[in-house]
Amino acid sequence: MINPNFPLGPANLAWANLFLERYVDAEKTVQQAAERQLNFPDLIMLPYVIAFYKGDRAGMELAAARGKDNPESADWMTNTEALALAYSGHLQQARTMTRRAVDMERQAHQSERAAMYEAGAAVREALFGNASEARQRAKVALGLSKGRDVEYGAAFALVLSGDIAGSRPLTNDLANRFPEDTFVRFTYLPIQRALLALSEEDSAAAIEYLEIAVPYDLAIPGSWFAFFGNMYAPYVRGQAYLSAHRYTEAVGEFQKILDHPGIVFADPVRAIAPLQLGRALASGGDRNKARAAYEDFLMLWRDADTGIPLLKQAKAEYIKL
């Protein structure tokens, strides 16, 4: 680095190493920044993320306490804790933490950040099968902001929770307001249009919509700040292949998510990718591998809240295997 004391440099380097699963390099970069006493929100957050990847619960708790003591990172850390809790199925606790993060931002008059956290919560609820809660969180998010990434998250959550009439205008609005935006053109709109096509049982159209997103499957979206949206194109493409009975291709898409943990962090799609992989394998007739994938998901959610609809479905499907 030309200027190692410019905090954005080591922060970006550490994130890049994490995305590439170079956890040791990321940790070394953060430690060197700490030795130089660089103060930057990302450098306060990163020890928590690194501890998460290492499975270091004590390290996560220590980093969270430090992060919440700093006014520049308190809200981000609190929402990230929510994400980690939801990842292991502790949804009630995750909701509490997200509400705290949103309240912090509202009190600070940071409505865009508050809306991002609400949009991420809406996506999480939709993916876990809580349609009513997802629609409510999406409504709250849109009441706070009509920003690009907020609108995308809300639209995604609404279509997954069955509110097609609510999602379609948001999708159209993204196309009209951001016609040249890279995120919108190559990830957000293809994903949204594919989901809308799937809601009409048109898997062929969904797969076609997502073709343009393939080169960007491993890209980091604008919604990354709230830690949702990473690798959603492969996730939706996997769903489309499942719908089209192209099970081998569906397996490949869900496996792609599992093969890149550095990119997806604790995004809910990483938590549920083993379940979707199991469904694809079971549909393709490979019951042994399907059982193993289901067991991976059920092990991750072994202490999860019992009322999550997706968990109930997974347990019922596993029994039939």
Image (tube, rainbow, N blue to C red):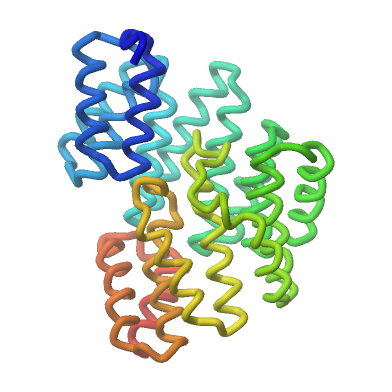
Camera-nearest residue between 105 and 153:
153
Q: Residue at x 26, y 60 (%)?
A: 303
Q: Is residue 122 left or right of residue 256?
A: right
Is residue 74 found left or right of 25 in the rendered image?
right
Q: Position of residue 213 (x, y in %)?
A: 62, 55
Answer yes or no: is residue 125 visible.
yes
- When the figure is inspected, residue 105 is found, relative to residue 37, above or below; the finding is below
Q: Position of residue 286 (x, y in %)?
A: 36, 88
Which quadrant holds the C terminus? bottom left
- The residue closer to the viewer here, 88 or 280, is 280
Where does residue 236 sit, x and y in percent of width and height?
A: 57, 63
| Residue 12 to residue 99: above or below | above
Indicate the position of residue 133 as horizontal and vertical percent values: 57, 54
Closer-to-camera residue (319/54):
54
Left or right placement of residue 34 versus residue 153 in this view: left
Q: Residue at x 21, y 18 (%)?
A: 32
